[in-house]
């Protein structure tokens, strides 16, 4: 197991190196001129050149790249010009916000989609199967920003049940001291009930929006995979042996159907991290996605590179976790390093 | 599993219902939501954005500031003509015009309790020059160019030597860039590579203004608390200000209507129009932005726009009223349909062109383009709320006189670079000058120095003479004559067609009063009252 992890981490090094190179090249290929952008109101030609020299953008690309790699190696991910902060600090404060939202949304969607998929598979053609079809179709076909705006319109504006879409915590409640960056965990650790309730309330609508969107693939995959497994020989045998329905369903069938579902969850999770942007915009969620998009608009190189790199590291980690879960779920699986 | 889900739903419902908050904190707290907040706390920093000017305005002080006046529509506006004390209790301009001496308040303190001295002022002005870029440029606009101009006479007396008589020097010391920093505190955080503590001041403040920064999370929120020891003006009523970033305009409007925020800036004109009509619940303060206008610029260095008749034809082909209705939603000031002979010395003022397709066709034929031509119309996607509908209407209208205009949408990040290249034949743009003088606007936009804001690359010796004469005019009569000539020529040569003067709109709750319009367009919380 540890050898597997070590080998996997080792093989991810060339991937990450490639990503460093590609993102560097891509950001330089963008047509925008950060010097002109940040020179702002003082945009005389001399002022732009002055800024360009200050940012080191007048040097040859190879020099810039070497400097970037050197700084990266020493833990300096560069400065975000548009927010004026070190990229690493920005990512460290924003990634937990995105992860908290994504994880809560993922858990919420799994809590609905997996039972729904299982039930739909056991009763094909029944009303629950139709419901499953409806939910998945609606979830995929409604764009995230639309569901977000709709939910916030209905539950916040019209009904007044949900809290104001003003970010992670009510403006009058102070945020908990940062330990993990997850407000729910931090406020629980600090024993701050008001902050916990407030951050949980703020999470509901954005998490629901994201969850609706990702429910579809998981529910469909669970249904399809369960249908396949339920018609397999070993299930028939188990039934013939007179095992209880629950035992057959959850003890044997579900565990065997879980592998493709896990793969889907892995894909969905990584997709959610990136697709957060719109939800973040709608709910003023200070996450990593909107930060990356804003930086891109400003041709702010360092945060874009930092964002891609963070995502790459997350994907590598995620794939590893999924593979380890495969091993736990199905002993027949061998994962090559 | 389903059972567990049901109980989770129930718990969620309970959370939604428990919304009671302490009411006391709310009375003295203002909650504001804007599209985006400051990116740093230092207005001198590279890339400091507009909201950071607002931070400088209330967290730092200037030596002097402007008085205020009430407009006919009840909105309070700063008075450009009236300078008032802020950090300096009084000042004298030398009789020979060689400089100005400021006497600082003896009891003024920075947030850390240390007194404000002339040495701090000198350090701050030198910093504005040394940081380069925008702060340096802004200081230069008022002939504040060299560190030697700034002189410490004694602890509470500070002198600025004039390089030349320039009426913009004093007002330039009342702009946010001329903020006074706590030099002793800032120097503690300076390093040999960073002598002006630029890194530290991005996230920390060294000011003495009416508000202190309680917390700053870029991209999320900034919280200000009142500095109770502030001596440089009447103590503000609001104790705390929470300014959140809420990118979605629709949500900001919902927040305001439901009473969860007290104020918001920067909405699409349509929303402001509708909110202004909702007088039962909300209040919208509107002021035309001084010295600012939307315009259609034509590159006069290349055919066909090197011909005056073509440009005049364009001015007659603009669908003014349609743009007023569909792009501006009736918010702003119309800059067309008056006369090309200037009535006053005010700028911007309406020109004499109006939509007249027949006349446009005739002018185009006289210029040798009876069948029109093809061109490209560019605009900045960053300002697409206004520019996109304008571009489409202009394209349609130009089609009627045979001009085929391709629309070129330039992403915000590339717009400045595109302007610098000066190769766009036709563009929709907006410019505003901080210092409210017509010749200041003309100096950037029509002068032969060909600054980046002269997007038309218009160069004309006679125009340059008018602008320079107006800037350094010795009498009011000469000044007014030169300004009129300048405007008359701009209307006749029409390298840019002024379209509309934009308005500054701010929507707020009905119980909010004391809003003041400032040239920097940022909120001044010091005068705001919540009843």
Image (cartoon, grey):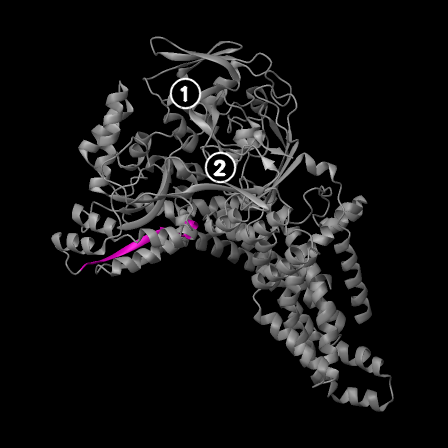
Residue A57 can be seen in this image: no
- Helix, strand or loop status at disc 2: loop
- Which secondary structure lies at badge 1? helix
Residue A101 x/y as whole percent = 67, 56
Residue under the image location 39 percent in, 46 percent down: A33
- Farthest bottom residue in view: A240
Query: In the rendered image, which quarter contains the N terminus of chain B?
Result: bottom right
Crowd rating for badge 2 (residues with CA inside 10 Å; few <14, some 14–19, many 20+): many
Front residue of B141/B366: it is: B366
- Magenta region: B372-384
Labelled disc at residue A101:
none
Q: Are marks 1 and 2 on the same chain?
A: yes
Of residues B474 and A119, the one drawn nearer to the viewer in this rendering: B474
Is residue B82 inside the magenta stretch? no
Real-space Cα separation, disc 1 to disc 2, in angstroms: 24 Å
Name which quarter of the figure residue B443 lies in.
top left
Q: Position of residue B33 (x, y in %)?
A: 58, 44
* Residue B235 in sight here: yes
User: Which chain does the numbered disc 2 sit on?
Assistant: B
Up-down: is B443 above or below B66?
A: below
Residue B103 location (% of width, % of height): 50, 11
Q: Of callouts 1 and 2, which one flags the residue occurring earlier in the amino acid sequence?
A: 2
Residue B379 lies within the magenta run: yes
- Residue B482: x, y in percent? 23, 27
Q: Where is residue B225, by image quadrant? A: top right
Q: Which residue is mark 1?
A: B170
The C terminus of chain B sits in image quarter: top right
Q: Which residue is mark 2?
A: B48
* Image vertical order of residue A141 relative to residue B64, above or below: below
Q: Is residue A144 left or right of residue B464?
A: right
- In the figure, B244 relative to B145: above or below? below
């Amino acid at each position: 197991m540890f050898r597997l992890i070590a080998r996997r981490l080792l093989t991810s090094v060339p991937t990450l190196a490639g990503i460093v190179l590609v993102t560097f090249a891509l950001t330089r290929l963008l047509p925008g001129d950060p010097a002109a952008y940040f020179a702002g109101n003082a945009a005389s030609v001399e002022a732009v050149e002055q800024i360009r020299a200050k940012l080191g953008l007048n040097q040859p690309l190879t020099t810039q790249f070497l400097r970037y790699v050197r700084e990266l190696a020493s833990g300096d991910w560069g400065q975000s010009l548009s927010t004026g902060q070190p990229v690493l600090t920005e990512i460290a404060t924003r990634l937990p916000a995105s992860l908290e939202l994504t994880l809560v949304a993922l858990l919420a969607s799994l809590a609905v989609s997996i039972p729904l998929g299982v039930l739909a598979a056991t009763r094909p053609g029944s009303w629950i199967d139709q419901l499953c079809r409806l939910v998945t179709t609606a979830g995929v076909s409604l764009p995230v920003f639309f569901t977000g705006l709709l939910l916030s319109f209905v539950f916040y504006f019209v009904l007044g049940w949900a809290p104001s879409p003003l970010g992670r915590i009510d403006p009058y409640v102070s945020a908990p001291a940062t330990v993990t960056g997850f407000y729910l965990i931090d406020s629980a650790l600090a024993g701050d009930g008001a902050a916990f309730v407030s951050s949980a309330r703020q999470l509901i609508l954005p998490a629901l929006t994201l969850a609706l969107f990702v429910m579809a693939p998981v529910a469909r995959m669970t249904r399809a995979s369960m249908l396949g497994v339920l018609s397999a020989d070993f299930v028939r045998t188990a039934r013939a042996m007179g095992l209880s329905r629950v035992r057959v369903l959850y003890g044997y069938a579900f565990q065997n159907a879980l592998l493709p579902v896990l793969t889907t969850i892995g894909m969905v999770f990584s997709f959610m991290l990136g697709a957060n942007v719109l939800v973040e915009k709608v709910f003023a969620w200070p996450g990593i996605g909107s930060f990356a998009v804003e930086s891109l608009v400003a041709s702010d190189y360092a945060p874009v590179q930092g964002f891609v790199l963070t995502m790459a590291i997350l994907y590598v980690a995620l794939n590893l976790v999924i593979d380890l879960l495969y091993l736990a779920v199905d002993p027949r699986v061998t994962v090559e390093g | 599993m389903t059972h567990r889900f049901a109980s989770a739903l129930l718990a969620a419902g309970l959370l939604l219902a428990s919304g009671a908050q302490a009411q006391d904190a709310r009375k003295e707290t203002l909650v504001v939501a804007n599209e985006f907040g400051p990116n740093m706390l230092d207005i001198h920093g590279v890339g400091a954005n507009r909201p950071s000017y607002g931070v400088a305005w209330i967290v730092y002080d200037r030596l002097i500031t402007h008085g205020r006046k009430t407009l006919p529509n009840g909105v309070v506006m700063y008075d450009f003509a009236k300078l008032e004390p802020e950090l300096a209790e009084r000042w004298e301009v030398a009789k020979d015009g060689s400089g100005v001496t400021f006497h600082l308040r003896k009891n003024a303190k920075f947030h850390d309790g240390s007194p404000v001295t002339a040495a701090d002022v000198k350090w701050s002005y030198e910093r504005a020059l040394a940081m380069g870029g925008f702060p340096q440029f802004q200081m230069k606009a008022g002939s504040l160019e060299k560190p030697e101009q700034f002189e410490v006479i004694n602890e509470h007396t500070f002198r600025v030597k004039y390089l030349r008589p320039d009426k913009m020097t004093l007002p330039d010391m009342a702009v946010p860039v001329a903020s006074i920093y706590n030099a002793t505190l800032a120097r503690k955080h300076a390093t040999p590579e960073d002598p002006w503590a630029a890194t530290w001041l991005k996230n920390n403040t060294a000011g003495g203004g009416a508000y202190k920064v309680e917390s700053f999370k870029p991209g999320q929120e900034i919280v200000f608390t009142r500095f109770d020891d502030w001596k440089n003006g009447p103590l503000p009523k609001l104790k705390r200000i929470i300014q959140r970033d809420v990118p979605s305009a629709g949500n900001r409007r919902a927040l305001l209507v439901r009473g969860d925020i007290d104020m918001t800036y920067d909405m699409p004109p349509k929303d402001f129009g509708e909110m202004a009509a909702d007088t039962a619940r909300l209040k919208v303060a509107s002021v035309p932005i001084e010295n600012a206008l939307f315009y259609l610029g034509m590159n006069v260095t290349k055919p066909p726009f090197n011909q005056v008749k073509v440009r005049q034809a364009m001015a007659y082909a603009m669908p003014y009223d349609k743009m007023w209705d569909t792009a501006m939603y009736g918010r702003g000031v119309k800059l067309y349909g008056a006369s090309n002979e200037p009535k006053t010395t005010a700028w911007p003022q309406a020109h004499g062109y109006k939509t007249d397709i027949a006349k446009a066709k005739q002018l185009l034929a006289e210029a040798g383009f009876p069948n029109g031509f093809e061109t490209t119309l560019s605009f900045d996607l960053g300002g697409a709320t206004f520019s996109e509908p304008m571009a489409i209407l202009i394209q349609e209208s130009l089609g009627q006189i045979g001009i085929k205009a391709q629309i070129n949408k330039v992403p915000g990040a590339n717009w400045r670079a595109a302007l610098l290249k000066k190769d766009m034949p036709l563009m929709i743009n907006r410019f505003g000058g901080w210092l409210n003088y017509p010749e200041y606007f003309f100096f950037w936009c029509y002068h032969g120095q060909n600054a980046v804001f002269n997007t038309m690359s218009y160069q004309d010796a006679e125009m340059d003479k008018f602008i320079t004469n107006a800037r350094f005019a010795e009498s009011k009569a000469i000044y007014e004559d030169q300004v009129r000539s300048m405007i008359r020529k701009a209307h006749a040569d029409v390298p840019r067609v002024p379209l509309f003067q934009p308005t500054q709109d701010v929507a707020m709750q009905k119980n909010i009063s004391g809003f003041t319009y400032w040239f920097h367009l940022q909120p001044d919380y010091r005068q705001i009252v919540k009843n």
